[in-house]
Image (tube, rainbow, N blue to C red):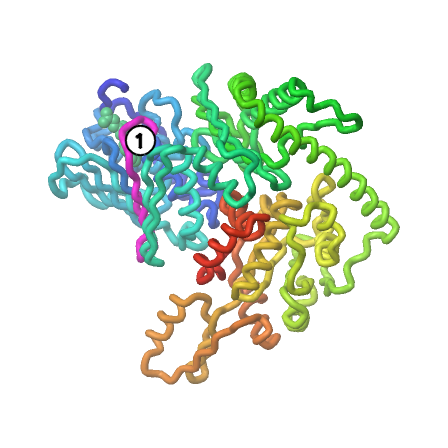
Amino acid sequence: MTKDYDASAIKVLEGLEAVRRRPAMYIGSVGKRGLHHLVNEVVDNSVDEALAGYCTRIVVTLHKDGSVSVEDNGRGIPVDKHPKYGISALEVVMTKLHAGGKFDKKVYKVSGGLHGVGVSVVNALSEWMEVRVKRDGKIWMQKYERGKPVTQLEVAGETDETGTYVRFKPDPEIFEDTRFDPSIIEARLKELAYLNPGLEIIFRDEINGKEKRFCFENGIVDLVKELTKGKNALHDDVIYLKGEDNDVIVEIALQYTQMEGSSEFSFVNNINTIEGGTHVTGFRMALTKAIKEAMEKQGLLKEKGVNIESEDIRDGLTAVISVKVPNPQFEGQTKTKLGNSEVRNVVYSIVYSGLKDYFEKHPELIKNIGNRIILAAKARIAAKKAKELVKRKSALETTTLPGKLADCIERDPEKCELFIVEGESAGGSAKLARTRQTQAVLPLRGKIINVEKAGLVKVLRNEEIKALISAIGTGIGEEFDIKKLRYGKIIIMTDADVDGAHIRTLLLTFFYRYMPKLIEEEKICIAMPPLYRIKAGKDIYYVYSEEEKEELLKKLEGKKVEVQRYKGLGEMNPEQLWETTMNPETRVIKKVFMEDAIEADRIFSILMGPDTEPRKEFIMTHAKEAVNIDV
Ligand code: 0RA
């Protein structure tokens, strides 16, 4: 494509000291999100090589020592000498800021987008990094520590292949916790495989002994199929459109189902734009217009008193919008909202004319979808009436807190935590165990309502849900107001068994559907009660996984040990519950991230959608891992 690349094309801007001094400026945070950013950054470089047409396979490995490697079969990072700096292009890429990726005018680079900081940033924030490049018949190798080369660029062997291998271990001096979460890595890799049809991505998790291969010949059409699995699709074929205008490439795939609500997933240059943006606006405008016109033509809009709104048109919709934009401008709180205004019109005209054609060719389809939309409009009108009733009633009842809530004393929400606890008996222990000043406890009776199936009207009538809503204080849906949030952390505390996982999933479904902002703002957490209590002489250990138990037992070999397995929170006395699960100094909790929305949506609907077959299949195959359905 471009003419021969050589090292002189690389622009060098800065050294890496700045990155270590202010890491959050480059990767967003030094928490979990920032840590996983490192992997994204390295993988994105390989994906760019695939986008450029030179790489077909990427292997990502989570090694036992906590390092991650990314290997691709692309052209390999150039190793020739940079004329100005007298070091290899590879070393420039690895050790100079902003030197990576911006070589030529390859248009649609992932690494030019959200991540886009270059692999040198990853190097700077790694305790060590090792790079191997297969190129020009040789295997080249160089090692670095905290961004600085510790070996020369060496020839480590011969090969007739090409490609790049980067392995790194995040620096504990920088990150709060350097352990990767395999499910976060896996979700991103799967997403990338969907967005790059035909690209083979393999994830080897050597810590847990698992390997997954992702490769989707039909790209986002396969993704939509996956998302609507078990949701009673209204039509068999996923609608797919592709077009290009003004250097903007637009791809959309969509399907209607019987489910309430809509799921739209949007991407710009392979980056998930959680906050949407101009591409999503353009898509929605086109969808509304194309569908309204098609319904009109079929005489479906005649019924009086039923006004179709664009939210009715999206009800039951699952859509993936993927665009490639040369110079994306990202805005918004999480820098995941596309700002380029020219993209709105490009998407609009491609989608509008594409859908118009499609509906003309499939008149029976628009009847089917149209009836679904009219039902949605009627349901919306009914729900609005019901909601007004509930609001009027709750205005009379004033905003009383639920009787079951054991509230905390502190009034500054930032300092307060709410524990949502499964079952009255564990709730009782938690009330005894807590720090009254800052920790509140809300026990929920066993099964709360299934929000996915029930619909808004029923959900709002459910006692457990009402208690939850008034304890949290924000309201739901359109009335949601984060300023009224009564707790800085909301911690879901359930048993480490299948029932516990189910209740947790139900709660997360509720938050996902009705208070998504709480997930976005990282307010929701999951408590991790220990699985075992191990007593060796006077020492007591709590362990949180099978692996941890095995490791500890090995260490304690020879000593007399007592192993107790906790089946539920109820088996712990209040002191133990405090020590292991509630004490902020010693407990383990897991933040719930929106980034897993795709996976969450899938799990929610499989476990709780109206169709029972895939649910059975899911429960059978995942029964053993059910404890880990953390969304
Ligand atoms: C710039 C130029 C060329 C390759 C790459 C970058 C490259 C970078 C990475 C990062 C991970 N994997 C990668 N693969 C390739 C080569 C251009 C040429 O050979 O003409």
Based on the picture, tell me whether residue 185 belongs to the magenta stretch.
no
In the image shown, does 593 or 500 lie closer to the viewer? 500
- Residue visible at 52% across and 56% down in the picture: 590
Does 322 sit above or below residue 261? Answer: above
Report whether residue 327 is seen.
Answer: no
Q: Is mark 1 on a helix, strand or loop?
A: helix
Q: In which quarter of the image is residue 538?
A: bottom left
Q: Is 493 displayed left or right of 136 in the figure?
A: right
Q: Is 609 displayed left or right of 312 in the figure?
A: left
- Residue visible at 32% across and 31% down in the picture: 50
In the image shown, does 76 or 369 lie closer to the viewer? 369
Report whether residue 537 is seen.
Answer: yes
Q: In which quarter of the image is residue 625?
A: bottom left
Q: Is 551 displayed left or right of 451 in the figure?
A: left
Residue 454 drawn at (x, y percent): 67, 49
Tell me the quarter of the image containing the N terminus: top left
Question: What is the span of residues highlighted in magenta in the rendered image?
Answer: 50-70
Does 159 sit above or below residue 207? Answer: above
Residue 606 drawn at (x, y percent): 53, 49
**Mark 1: C-beta under 8 Å from nearest atom of ligand 1:** yes
Q: Mark 1 points at which residue?
A: 49
- Residue visible at 42% across and 50% down in the picture: 174
Residue 68 drawn at (x, y percent): 33, 49
Q: Is 50 displayed left or right of 596 in the figure?
A: left
- In the image, what residue type sits under mark 1? Glu
Q: In which quarter of the image is ligand 1?
A: top left
Outermost residue, front side: 364
- Residue visible at 19% across and 29% down in the picture: 81
